[in-house]
Amino acid sequence: MLIHGNFYYLSHLLRFIKACILMPFSVLKKSWKPALVISLIYLVSGIVWIWVSDRIPVPFITSQETMLLFQTIKGFVYVSITAVLLFFLIYRQIRKQNNLIKLLRKRNRLMNFALSQHSGLNVLLLDREMVVLQAFGKERLWSGKKMTEVPGDSIYEWSAHGRDKQMLQHFFKKTREKGKNKKELKIKDQWYFLKANLLPDSSGQQDLMLLLVDNISQHKHYQEEQAVFINKNRVLEQKVAEEAYRLRSQQLKFREVFDGIGDGVIIRQLNAMGQTGLIENINRSALHLLGLNSMMVTPEGLWRHIVGDNQEAFHQFLNHVYTETSQLHLAVEVETGSVNRHLLLKSRYLNTGARPYVMIVISEQPQTIDSEGLQSSLLYRMLNKFPDGVLLISPELRCIYCNPTMREWLKWNAAEESSASIHDLKRQFGDMDVIQQVSEALEGDVVQSIDFQLPHLENRWFSSVFYPVTDHSGRVEVVVRITRDVSVRRSYEETLYNQQNVVDESNRLKTLFLSNLSHEVRTPMNGIMGFVELLEQDEISEIQRYYLDLIRRSGDNLLSILDGLVEIARLENGQVTVHKQWMEPLPLVHEIESYLREKLKMASKQLIEVHIRVDKEVLPEKIYSDPDKIREVLHLLVDNAVKFTQQGWIEVGAGYSGNGHLSFWVHDTGIGIKKLSKYQIFQPFMTYNDSENVLYGGLGLGLSIAKGLSDVMGASIELESEVGKGSKFLLSVPLQLGENADKGTPVTDVAEPGKVLVVQYGLPTDSVIQLLKQYNVKLLHAVDGTAAIDLLFEVRDIDLIIADVRLSDMDAFELIHALKRINAMVPVIAQTAYFIAEEKQRCMNEGFADYLVKPVDHTVIIKLLRKL
């Protein structure tokens, strides 16, 4: 409203100032025509006068002297007439100007009076060059000068800052184009409202500009403060709403806990006299104990079912002044229908600071059972039939009651029971600290004992629980000890413990056996395969080449079995890591297709058709995952399909499953899997049992490895199969889409040439050596520890050492100590044929940088170089 009121006032003030400025120009505009007419009349009259006077014959002009006198008189008359006319014209003009000046002075006083009522408003009259002609107002504006000092200054000279000057130039340019303009500008940290109009000068051209400047910084400040206030108010409203919601939640939780209390609780307000007043809260237990419902809860009808002779004490309880005494107890009797209850009322004064309350706790008084009354009660007969041992202990540490089961275990008779104390129990129960446990129970805690044996029952185990029983005042009246025979449970536990030890020992022996088997078989196999490669390079006959091919295939099969054993061990011990990068699913599917065709050719099953099904419209271009692990899983699924398919077709495909996963599948028309076997097929060493035809072999590791790799990636494998129709394995990979492969972290070239020393019996494979050369990595080899030490003395710039744990002349632990004495900075990696947890822990303790399981491929070496 303030800014709109200012605009209305400024609009009327602008019209008033415009009238003041334009008045002299309007007078001049109306005066030039009469002046021109008078000048023309005077000119014509003079010409006529000269022409007529020169041609009229004058009789008295007879000589040159008379002619001269006549010309002088004629000029004097002409000049006199001219002077008279000029006098009238000048007088008239001066009079008009004086009247105009008086009017301007009068209007300037009005203008100054109007501007004084609006302290932030200033009026400037500018020419075409933006020079100030006139200025009115009290504000110094951004020039720092008074308005009486600014005429003659250029308005651009006030703005030293380039940006302020550009804004003003743009504003005045728009004003020249439109004839008028208005805008809010921030100049030198002050906000101004500028309104400009073009005015005509004396020639009628719009060269003058009337500029109104209003300092609205304070208004802007008010607006900012208002915005901050609104934001703070909004935040406070949100906090209030959250606090209200939290308060409501706390109230609901309080009500739930309040209603769940076993004792009755009533919270009442206090009146001005310090007595109980309105009911603030009452829980369900209080309603039940008092025989009320929620509709009957009023201050007057709260105690309607109270009966008994102690009415005077109850009246004092109702009218008690809690500001004098903060606590009060009273025992009452409640009669509800056919049920009578003996209740204990405990009231307590509470002052939370804001408002005082009284909390009344209502508890039902238990009936006291002594040792004589216990025997004649129903509870006594029940305890006598209880299969566990029950013993009641008084606060004086005397035995009140012992049931027959407990008496039999303790070998007590009735006389011993009546005179037994806690010290007798201590002697009967051997080393168990009975006194300490009973003392804790007497303090109100439930105490659980450890398993123990009785001296005369060495083959049986027992366990006891001590329960405190309190009276209406909260004092522990008796401790109930319940003892149970846990011999069967102890027997089960010992059996399970022994079986677990047997299983652990079996797993340890299996691990050691597979480790030694893998190590002992892989080393000669590497030699065999190396010699096969050498023989293939010689000129041999076709039959010899065929034999060598059989040897190579057999060796590859054996190495694949060893690789499977190693991979299972790595998966079981968490040694497999995921290396994600941006990958393209479509090329991977075509790669699996080529692998499938090659496998069918090697298995002489070219008649089986190969189908590829890819939904390219929904298949993402790139995903972020581990392509090596996906490729390995699909290879294993393809191997399984080729193995169990004799005819028909095998399909490989990929597609978007619609639930945030990308699916790869291998579908075949093989023998299928029984429904009960679906849950066992992914377990290690589970193979298909064909009782009629022995067509399928293997160790049963392929699908278990595939399942383990998928679990490591966070993916899943599902199986759909029907006996005689085939199987479909579906690999679902969590989908993370991407556009640029540059965002991934693929293995790149090592920044600088690296040297790696491998200490093992036998050279690494040629493929690993060639691949490392592509990454500018030089591979050095030592066959034993002595050769490695000598080589480290000769080559000091080795970047990484990979040493076999088992060497021919020394073990890896002796080797690392020697290597560290030569060069303590070079990292040493331990490699083994099979993962052993104890061996890994020892390697890490001895100073190895890492522990790897063979085979170690080139990517692992490159990543180690980049990491270390």
Image: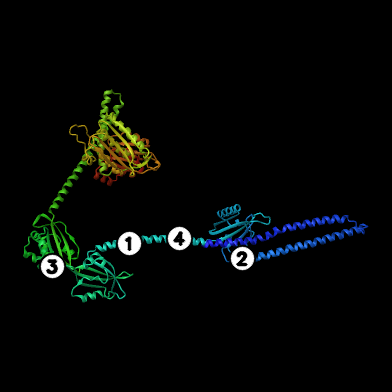
Q: Is residue 783 visible?
A: no
**Residue type, mark 3 in image:** Ile
Badge 4: residue crowd in 10 Å (few <14, some 14–19, many ≥20): few
Q: CA distance from mark 1 to mark 2?
A: 63 Å
Image height check: is 378 above or below 585?
A: below
- Residue drawn at x 30%, y 25% is 538
| Residue 81 shows up from this direction | yes
Left-right relation of 762 to 475:
right
Where residue 744 appears, as percent x and y from the top left, is 38, 42
* Image spot of residue 182 (x, y percent): 56, 56
Within 10 Å of disc 1 (Cα), the crowding (few <14, some 14-19, many 20+) is: few
Q: Which numbered disc, 4 or 3, marks the residue that appears first in the sequence? A: 4
First reached walking from the N terminus: tag 1 or tag 2: 2
Answer with mark 2 or mark 3, whichever residue precedes in sequence: 2
Residue under label 4: 228
Q: Dot 3: within a 10 Å radius of its alpha carbon, few (fewer than 14), some, or many (20 or more) residues?
A: few
Q: Where does residue 413 sit, x and y in percent of width and height?
A: 6, 63
Dots 2, 3 in contact, CB < 8 A: no
Residue assigned mark 1: 248
- The residue to which callout 3 is attached is 369
- In this figure, which colouring scheme has been used for the structure? rainbow
Callout 2 amino acid: Asn
Give the number of the mark in front: 4 or 2.
Answer: 2
User: Which callout, 1 or 4, points at the residue further toward the start of the chain?
Assistant: 4
**CB contact under 8 Å: marks 3 and 1:** no
Towards the viewer: 354 or 780: 354
Q: Which residue is mark 2?
A: 112
Separation of residues labelled 4 and 3 (CA atoms)? 73 Å
Q: CA distance from mark 1 to mark 4?
A: 29 Å
Residue 827 image label: none
